[in-house]
Amino acid sequence: MTCVMWEELDLSLWWPWYRRIRRAFGFRLRDDRYAAKVLGEIVGGRFVGMEEVQHAIRGKNVVVFGAGPSLERDVRELSRFRDDCIFIAADGASRALVREGIEPDFVVTDLDGIVGSVPCSNSIYIVHAHGDNVKLLSKFVPEIRAVHPTTQAEPLQNVFNYGGFTDGDRACFIADEMKARMIVLAGMDFGKEIGKYSGSKENTLTVKKMRYARRLLSFLSSISASELYNATSKGIEIHGFRRVGHEELEAIIRA
C-alpha cells in the first residue's frame, strides 16, 4: 500500500472531496473560512499545537469511538484497552465514555454534541470550525482547557486541515496523519438508526452525512499506512477496515 501524506500534496487529495461535500450539502466556502478565522482568534492560550498531538498518537494504537447505536456496548467491551490505546471520542461519544468513568485522550468535535457543558475537563479537544457552528465556538471554546483547532477550508497559522467531514471520520484522518500504528473503529454503525449520543436528531440529513463519512473512510484506507480495524459491534462494513471481534482485537493489541 502506498501512503501519500497530506502535507506532501498540499491537501490536493482533500479538495475534490470538499467540493463534492459543499455541493451535496449547500455549504459555502466563505462561511467555512469565516468560522476558521473566528476559531483562530478566540483559541488564545488554550491552543495545542500539532507537535503535541502527534507526540501523543505517533506509533500508538488508537480507538476512535463514534456516536452510533453500538457505542455503549463497545465502550464497555473496549474499556479493557484503556492502558493499551489512545482513546479518541467523536463529539457526543465522549459522554458515553464519561458515564463509564473514562475520559478520552482527545475529543474530536464541531461542538454540536455538547449538552449543557463540556464533559471532559482533562481531554484535548480537537475543535472543528465550519460555517454553521460559529455561535457554538464562541460559547464553548472559552470553557475548554486545551484546544487543537481544525477547519475543512484552507488552513491558517493556528487552524489545521487534516481532511475528513464528520467528527468520526475526521478523527481517523487525524490519527492517520499523526502516524498512529493502528486505528480501530468502535460505535460506528453507519446505518439508518441515529445513536442517542449523536449531536443530530435530523435522521435524513444525518444518514446522508454518514454515507459520505463511510466513503471517506474507505478512501482513507487506500492511502493509510496504519493498520485499520472495525470493532463496532453491529453496523455496516467499511471497505479497507477489517472487521474484528472484541476478543480477536485483544489478541491483536496485546500480541
Image: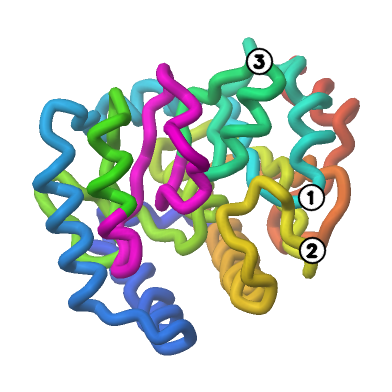
Q: Is residue 21 magenta?
A: no
For badge 1, the amino acid type reads Pro
For the residues labelled 2 and 3, say whether their Cβ atoms are less than 8 Å apart: no
The residue nearer to you, when weighing 87 against 216, is 87
For the residues labelled 3 and 1, say whether their Cβ atoms are less than 8 Å apart: no
Residue 69 disc label: 1
Viewed as shown, does residue 142 lie left or right of 20? left
For badge 2, the amino acid type reads Glu
Q: Residues within 10 Å of mark 3 (few under 14, many from 20)?
A: few
Q: Is residue 227 above or below residue 210?
A: above
The reply to whether residue 158 is in sight is yes
Q: Is residue 132 magenta?
A: yes
Residue 72 in which image quadrant: top right
Q: Which residue is mark 2?
A: 193
Q: Residues within 10 Å of mark 1 (few under 14, many from 20)?
A: many
Q: What is the x, y in percent for residue 61? A: 59, 27
Count of marks overlaid on the render: 3
Task: Look at the image and tell me in which quarter the N terminus lies.
Answer: bottom right
Q: What is the x, y in percent for residue 45? A: 13, 27
For the residues labelled 2 and 1, say whether their Cβ atoms are less than 8 Å apart: yes
Residues in magenta?
108-135
Q: CA distance from mark 3 to mark 1?
A: 19 Å
